[in-house]
Amino acid sequence: MNTPIPDELKAMFALEGIEERLALLQALVLPANAGELVKLSSLADDEIGGFLAAYTSHPNHSGDPDGKVRSRATFDEKIKAMALVLPKLDANPANYEGHLDFLTALRLLRNNAAHESGLHIDDATKFCKNPAMLAMVQDFPKTLWANVKALRVYLAGLPL
């Protein structure tokens, strides 16, 4: 008995863009790559946590005397906070939207790579349609490191 292959799975193996999709899937399922994703997301988490802690402890902004932003907020909460803070510091959304897209995509990839249950076909299909995720895994892990470095340089240049 032949089991029909879902259309979403067939689309995953279409020849157009196959290299990008395979790179994404490898980044998620190979244990060494999953470890690299977790390490890089932790670094990005620390970067934005430190930035938010500095921002909220500045006399001109609401404070965070207990360091809750850095120590207790989740990566997702920090990304959402960054989405609120960056427009206050940078009038040009083009300067920060790419960083926010990167952080969001990195969080999703990290969450998926960190779970041992494997990559569900629905998630794989969704991820392979996401240009930010596809771009991040090109020349893995160099592109991810470059994105984290660019984020660090951008945040260091912002006025508090």
Image: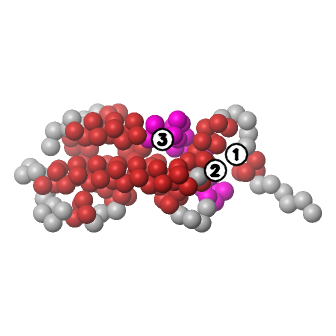
Q: Kindly identify the residue that appears in the image at 53 percent across and 57 percent down.
A: 113
Q: Where is residue 60 in the image (x, y as percent from the top left)?
A: 9, 49
Q: Main secondary structure of the magenta part?
A: helix
Q: Mark 1 points at which residue?
A: 12
Residue that label 2 marks: 125
Q: Quick one: label 1 or label 3, which is nearer the N terminus?
A: 1
Q: Is mark 3 on a helix, strand or loop?
A: loop
Identity, as a three-letter code, of the amino acid under mark 1 = Met
Q: Which of 17 and 85 is in front in this view?
A: 17
> Are there few (<14), some (14-19), or many (20+) residues within 10 Å of tag 1?
some
Q: Give the range drawn in magenta.
A: 119-144
Q: Is residue 132 left or right of residue 157?
A: right
Of circles 2 and 3, the one toward us is: 3
Type of residue at label 2? Thr
Position of the C terminus, as image quadrant, is: top left
Q: Is residue 148 left or right of residue 113?
A: left
The mark found on residue 141 in the picture is 3
Occupied quadrant, residue 71? bottom left
- Asked if marks 1 and 2 touch (Cβ < 8 Å), the reply is yes
